[in-house]
Image: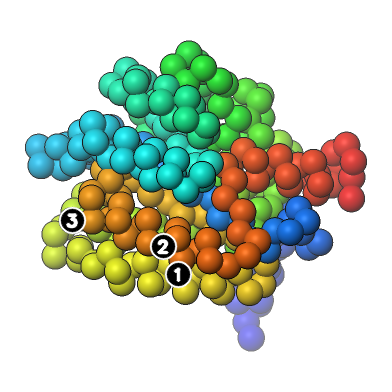
């Protein structure tokens, strides 16, 4: 093996070790007594904001509007009917477009969390801070409660400074875990989700500006069967599932019906907990705090 190749391998190993050191997994994780597993139902209330950023055609914009006018209300009704405490990740500017819907989320006992100001994070740090502050203020004023969670790629230092206690963006583990930034500071709990449990991956043409040929509309029953299998696998090991929905996607009547059947199926098994992401986060923070914090394990 050449000296150059040996150096490259060592550099890769060092980089991997540095990255690994930023993550803290909860090896002794357990749920409250009587709970076998938790399922977080989350919704990304993007409406047409992402469509506008991608400069998509009017048909895509109309899909986003459906989510704000119809889809979000159907999801609230679905969650209410099952006594599920859902988390709705909401861009700040949605408060300008659909304030009644945002307020209704909180009024019905669900959680409103941050999803960036305009569904993007500026590269300029000062502008990024301005976006996060504006989103936080808008959500607080409209929902009536300050958000404590986010689904974003905001800088962790800014999130910690603004008082956020969790992010739901990374996928490094199948259960909640802690992660620090590149300076090995600003520890934040991450509540993971995965694109395999994301409705938009299965039900949207031209998703994220891709060509129609790259997309397939999947039958709701097939998707629910896959999600049921994922649920069962996690249930057997006392794991966790984060179901990521979009009002403009899953707000369609036939998909609401399919989700209703899936939830009823989940509820046939004992010990399934349907908390909000905030409830899940507080369970972890109170019982399994990160090393170096108060109540260290």
Write the residue at 28% across / 21% down.
Answer: 97
Q: x, y (%) of residue 35?
A: 70, 58
Task: From the image, state whether disc 1 or disc 3 is nearer to you.
Answer: 1
| Residue 53 in sight here | no
Sequence-earlier tag: 1 or 2: 1
Write the residue at 35% across / 19% down.
Answer: 99
Which residue bears the numbered disc 2? 262
Write the residue at 60% across / 76% down.
Answer: 5
Contact flag, marks 1 and 2 (Cβ < 8 Å): yes
- Taking 87 as reference, is 23 left or right? right
Write the residue at 62% across / 38% down.
Answer: 278
Q: CA distance from mark 2 to mark 3?
A: 24 Å
- Taking 255 as reference, is 182 left or right? right
Sequence-earlier tag: 2 or 3: 3
10 Å crowding of disc 3: few (<14), some (14-19), many (20+): some
Which residue bears the numbered disc 1? 228
Which residue bears the numbered disc 3? 205
Q: Judge whether 291 appears above or below 185 on screen.
A: below
Q: x, y (%) of residue 146?
A: 57, 21
- Taking 96 as reference, is 58 left or right? left
């Amino acid at each position: 093996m050449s000296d150059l190749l040996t150096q490259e391998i060592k550099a890769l190993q060092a980089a991997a070790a540095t990255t690994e050191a930023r993550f803290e997994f909860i090896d002794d994780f357990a749920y409250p007594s009587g709970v076998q597993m938790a399922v977080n139902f989350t919704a990304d209330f993007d409406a047409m904001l992402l469509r506008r950023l991608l400069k998509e055609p009017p048909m895509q914009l109309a899909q986003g509007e459906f989510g704000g006018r119809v889809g979000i209300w159907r999801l609230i009704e679905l969650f209410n009917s099952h006594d599920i405490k859902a988390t709705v990740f909401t861009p700040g500017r949605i408060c300008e477009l659909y304030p009644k819907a945002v307020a209704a989320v909180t009024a019905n006992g669900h959680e409103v969390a941050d999803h960036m100001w305009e569904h993007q994070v500026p590269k300029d740090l000062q502008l990024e801070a301005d976006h996060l502050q504006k989103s936080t203020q808008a959500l607080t004023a409209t929902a009536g409660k300050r958000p404590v969670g986010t689904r974003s790629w905001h800088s962790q230092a800014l999130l910690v400074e603004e008082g956020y206690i969790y992010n739901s963006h990374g996928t490094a583990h199948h259960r909640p875990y802690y992660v620090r930034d590149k300076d090995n500071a600003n520890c934040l709990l991450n509540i993971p989700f995965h694109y395999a449990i994301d409705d938009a991956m299965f039900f949207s043409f031209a998703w994220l500006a891709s060509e129609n040929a790259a997309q397939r509309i999947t039958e709701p029953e097939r998707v629910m069967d896959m999600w049921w299998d994922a649920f069962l696998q996690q249930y057997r090991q006392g794991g966790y599932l984060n179901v990521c929905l979009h009002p403009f996607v899953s707000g369609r009547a036939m998909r609401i019906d399919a989700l209703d059947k899936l939830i009823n199926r989940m509820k046939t098994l004992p010990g399934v907990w349907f908390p909000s992401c905030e409830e899940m986060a507080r369970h972890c923070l109170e019982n399994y705090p990160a090393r170096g914090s108060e109540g260290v394990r």
